[in-house]
Image: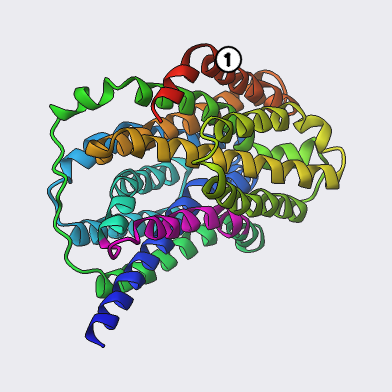
Amino acid sequence: MNNTKKRSRIWSSILCLAFAGFIFNTTEFVPVGLLPNIAESFSMDVSHAGLLLTIYAWAVSLLSLPLTILTSKMERRKLLIFLFCLFIGSHVLAGFAWNFMSLMLARIGIACAHAVFWAITTPLAVRLAPNGKRAQAMGFIVVGVSMATVLGIPIGTMIGQLLGWRFTFLCIGFIAFCIMILLTNLLPSVPSTNTISIKDIPHVLKRPVLLNIYLLTAIIITGHFTAYTYITPFMLSVGGFNQHTVVILLLAVGFSGMIGSFIFAKFAEQHPTAILVIPVLLLMICLLSLYVCVLSLYTAILQGMIWGLAITIIGMVMQSKVIDVAPDAADIATSVYSGIYNIGIGGGAFVGSQVLILLSTQYIGFIGAIFVIIALLLFFFFSRKIWILSK
């Protein structure tokens, strides 16, 4: 009976970590659906409001590795509680932001918590899992992350549209507080076992496969977020949809992301190259056809589902590949990957803002597709052989 209670407590802890992943990913991308509202409240244009995603992502990129090294010796339960306190406090500041700069400061505070959270959470879930259940524990975290796109971002957008964007941030802070209380009671003391040394970093980063993963990730994610960051103003101005329809489209993208996680689990081992190439091709097609697809609600929903499916599989392929090729230095490799991914997010948000300023909203899909095409060419001409040999 005692053993049963112990296992139940362990799985409850892992489930709480999955909920934490849900809330951390929700807050990163929820401004995508709220940019017009935020811009209006501060009397600024949407392209400048998009800096909320750019600066956030670049802060995570710059801080992931330094903060992970700085906190590498901390006991994991205490570290998580500290991260949640910073996360919650920053959301309270966002909810009461008196100008755009104070909102930006709040976002940077959230980014600091995010940078360390994603470096330690998946390894922590794996450590907590009973023998033979590591994959299941990782699956919980992946589902939590996927649900942020499926439910978190659309619901956060809906709340922001009905009650104001400030209320969305306050709601996220309150939910995070509840999760922190649960983790405080459920999570056992977990001493750090992976003390990271600065001397280890160059050795890890010399690996050709890792460098290829990082380069491809940066380019593909830049292309994706060139369009996705400004999908709400695109759907409103180019597609002519109302805000409620935009929520439905965001739900379509998120729901198909869940399907993508199942496809990855089923085919990743048998088809290691196709599981990357096909989704990247689909992403390229979605971006190129974005302008045409929004002419009809049905084609927009279908296109959104294919888009969500493709980007979810791409992210899972890249992250699993990082762990596969650097099992001896997972914290370092994962931390750098998180930083690179966020360089792509920030770069895409910045490129998209320039498209809005210099060209027009209708061109974000075409410009985003250029990056994806470059990534495909790099893969086939330079990376494919290294990728196959690494299996």
The residue located at (65%, 23%) in the rendering is 369
Q: Residue furthest right?
A: 296
Can you identify the residue that label 1 sits on? 377
Q: Which amino acid is tagged 1?
A: Leu
Quadrant housing residue 43: top right
Left or right: 133, with 367 as reference point: left
Q: Is residue 169 left or right of residue 7?
A: right
* Residue 56 visible in the current orientation: no
Near-viewer residue (33 or 312): 312
Residue at 35% in and 65% down: 14
Spot occupied by residue 60 in the image (x, y as percentages of width and height)? 36, 38
Q: Nearer the viewer, residue 10 or 385?
A: 385
What stretch of residues is rendered in magenta?
A: 128-154
Mark count: 1
Which residue occupies the foreground of this view, 212 or 359? 212
Quadrant showing the N terminus? bottom left
Q: Name the residue located 60 percent from the left edge and 42 percent from the top edge.
A: 39
Percent from the top left, x then y, of residue 371?
Answer: 58, 20
**Figure check: 9 above or below 102:** below
| Local secondary structure at mark 1 | helix
